[in-house]
Image: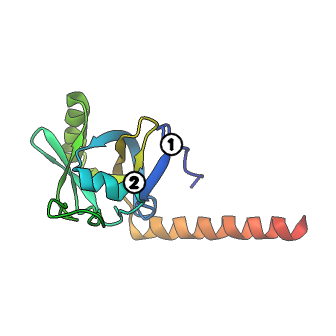
Amino acid sequence: MSKPLPSPFDKTKVVAENRRARFDYFVDDRFEAGIALTGTEVKALRQGEGSIAESYATVDGDEIWLINSHIPEYSHGNRLNHEPRRKRKLLLKGREIAKLHGAVTRQGLTLVPLSIYFNSKGRAKVELALARGKKVHDKRDTVKERDWKREQARLMRSRG
């Protein structure tokens, strides 16, 4: 496989990244989605806390939800603090939701969050990918290619 393409999205501060997603899935299309958060969730994300390692997105009717993402409770939050693993609504245009719904139901693709970040306007965004699951032999090929590239880089450093 080749080096992953740079993201076309305006990422100023990446908070959480799903590095395992590129190992487990072939990424087809990527979308930028807003995320509906409470105040304490935004504050916790601004502190750099949060994880999307085991999360996924589902289409429920005409809405898309981020499931199993973990944003820990804000340390200075009071009784109005949020639940760390609650479902969070993703904000997309209707046409994009229809496209994703069709791809998930007809083609059997999976919606995988790749990263949560803040854009230049300070808004929290999720980079969402339409992905196809890899088989075991595909994963072996990925590991083999990654090890070979690492070996090449090591050999080039020792020569020069």
Q: Is residue 137 above or below residue 46?
A: below
Q: Quadrant of the N terminus?
A: bottom right
CA separation in Å, label 1 and label 2 = 21 Å
Left or right for 156, reference 115: right
Query: Is residue 86 at least partly visible in the picture?
Result: yes
**Mark count:** 2
Q: Is residue 143 above or below residue 93?
A: below
Q: Quadrant of the C terminus?
A: bottom right
Residue 45 percent across, percent down from the top left = 36, 56
The residue type indicated by label 2 comes to Arg
SS at badge 2 = helix
Identify the residue under disc 1.
7
- For label 1, the crowd category at 10 Å Cα-Cα, with few meaning under 14, some 14 to 19 and many 20 or more, is few
Q: Could you say which disc has been placed on residue 46 in the image?
A: 2
Residue in the picture at 42% in, 35% down: 121
Residue 126 percent across, percent down from the top left = 35, 47
Q: Is residue 124 above or below residue 50?
A: above
The residue type indicated by label 1 comes to Ser
The mark closer to the camera, 1 or 2, is 2
Left or right for 74, reference 17: left
Residue in the picture at 20% in, 30% down: 94
Q: How is the model colour-coded?
A: rainbow
Left or right for 55, reference 101: right
Say which of 85 and 66 sits in front.
85
Task: Work out which residue is located at the far right of the displayed protein and give it.
Answer: 160
Residue 137 percent across, percent down from the top left = 45, 69
Q: Residue 35 falls in which quadrant of the image?
A: top left
Left or right for 9, reference 57: right
Q: Residue 158 falls in which quadrant of the image?
A: bottom right
Residue in the picture at 35% in, 62% down: 50
Query: Is residue 132 at least partly visible in the picture?
Result: no
